[in-house]
Image: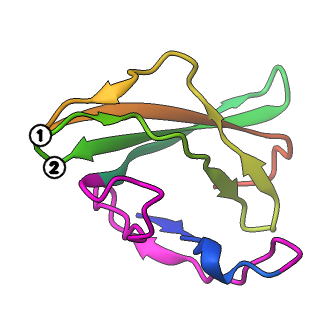
């Protein structure tokens, strides 16, 4: 189980900050997405894998997050462009780097997987 912060773009203040408390997230459960027209209403996004590896040689850790995007509709939808971040217990935020090769769309009643990597500079930081 990991903790997940879900930001609501409508409640972000002028400085771009939002106070959101992390909640336990059961891996594989669809995130509650806003019905604001930004993402297709038939799209579900779930975090399927979140693993960390460590490089003692280079002095950093890498987290790989794999997200499953499911189209529950009856028509193909374009692969959405979204960004993710990993927040350490010590307050550091690490922006995710999205895989460069990904499908351009999602067929009806199918899923696609998109991976993000997070390079953690502080060896003492944990996910």
Q: Residue at x 38, y 70 (%)?
A: 35
Q: Mark 2 points at which residue?
A: 72
Rendering coords of residue 11 (x, y %)? 66, 83
Q: Is residue 32 highlighted in magenta?
A: yes
Q: Do the residues labelled 1 and 2 touch (CB within 8 Å)?
A: yes
In this picture the colour scheme is: rainbow
Rendering coords of residue 70 (x, y %)? 25, 44
> Image quadrant for the C terminus?
bottom right
Magenta stretch prevailing secondary structure: loop
Would you place residue 98 above or below residue 51 in this image?
above
Q: What is the spatial separation of the Cα atoms under label 1 and label 2, in whole angstroms?
A: 5 Å
Rendering coords of residue 103 (x, y %)? 38, 21
Answer with mark 1 or mark 2, whichever residue precedes in sequence.
2
Label 2 residue SS: loop
Displayed quadrant of residue 109: top left
Label 1 residue SS: loop
Would you place residue 63 above or below residue 127 in this image?
above
- Which label number is shown at residue 109? 1
> Image quadrant for the N terminus?
bottom left
Q: Residue at x 81, y 44 (%)?
A: 123
Range covered by the magenta-colored residues: 14-43
Q: Classify mark 2: residues with Cα within 10 Å, few (<14), some (14-19) or many (20+).
A: some
Would you place residue 91 above or below residue 113 in this image?
below
Q: Is 112 positioned to the left or the right of 87 in the image?
A: left
Q: Classify mark 1: residues with Cα within 10 Å, few (<14), some (14-19) or many (20+).
A: some
Please tell me which residue lies in front, 87 or 109.
109
Q: Residue at x 61, y 50 (%)?
A: 84
């Amino acid at each position: 189980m990991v903790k997940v912060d879900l930001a609501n773009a409508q409640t972000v203040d002028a400085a771009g900050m939002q106070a959101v408390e992390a909640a336990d997230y059961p891996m594989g459960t669809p995130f509650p997405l806003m019905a604001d027209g930004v993402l297709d209403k038939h799209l579900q996004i779930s975090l399927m894998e979140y693993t960390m590896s460590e490089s003692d040689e280079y002095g950093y850790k890498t987290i790989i997050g794999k997200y499953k995007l499911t189209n529950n509709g009856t028509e193909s939808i374009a692969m959405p462009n979204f960004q993710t971040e990993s927040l350490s217990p010590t307050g550091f935020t690490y922006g995710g780097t999205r895989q460069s090769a990904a499908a351009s769309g999602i067929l009806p009643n199918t899923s696609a997987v998109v991976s993000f990597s997070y390079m953690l500079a502080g060896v003492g930081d944990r996910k």
